[in-house]
């Protein structure tokens, strides 16, 4: 879905709210990485905000926190 947004609609950024994510597995992480790659290929930005404790932990364990653009709140994500 994110890939289509970047390619077909020429969106400059997609902002994802991860506040209510109660579970994320390797396929979820792979989807986020695919979206990040698609955004970079399109010269756009994929922004995450409001990471739930589970989402934060999975990205931290995977050592992926530093490759994503992450904000605490929607307001900060929108301002970025």
Image: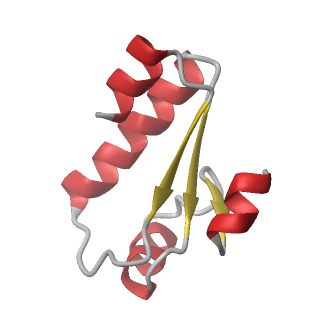
Q: Is residue 20 above or below residue 4?
A: below
Please name the residue shown 71% across and 66% down the image: 75
Q: Is residue 53 above or below residue 11?
A: below
Instruction: Quadrant for residue 35, please give it.
Output: top left
Q: Is residue 3 above or below residue 9?
A: below
33 or 44: which is nearer to us? 44
Please name the residue shown 32% across and 75% down the image: 21
Q: Residue furthest bottom?
A: 53
Left or right: 55 in relation to 45: left
Instruction: Quadrant for residue 52, please give it.
Output: bottom left
Quadrant in the picture for the N terminus: top left
Give the percent coordinates (x, y) of residue 50.
54, 74
Give the percent coordinates (x, y) of residue 15.
54, 49
Please name the residue shown 53% across and 28% down the image: 39
Left or right: 35 in relation to 4: right
Colour mapping used in the image: secondary structure
Give the percent coordinates (x, y) of residue 28.
26, 56
Q: Residue furthest right?
A: 79
Left or right: 62 in relation to 23: right
Left or right: 25 in relation to 67: left
């Amino acid at each position: 879905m994110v890939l289509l947004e970047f390619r077909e609609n020429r969106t400059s950024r997609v902002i994802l709210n991860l506040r209510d994510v109660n579970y994320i597995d390797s396929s979820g992480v792979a989807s986020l990485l695919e979206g990040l790659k698609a955004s970079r290929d399109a010269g756009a930005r994929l922004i995450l905000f409001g990471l739930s404790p589970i989402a934060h932990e999975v990205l931290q364990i995977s050592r992926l926190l530093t490759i994503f653009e992450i904000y605490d709140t929607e307001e900060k994500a929108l301002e970025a």
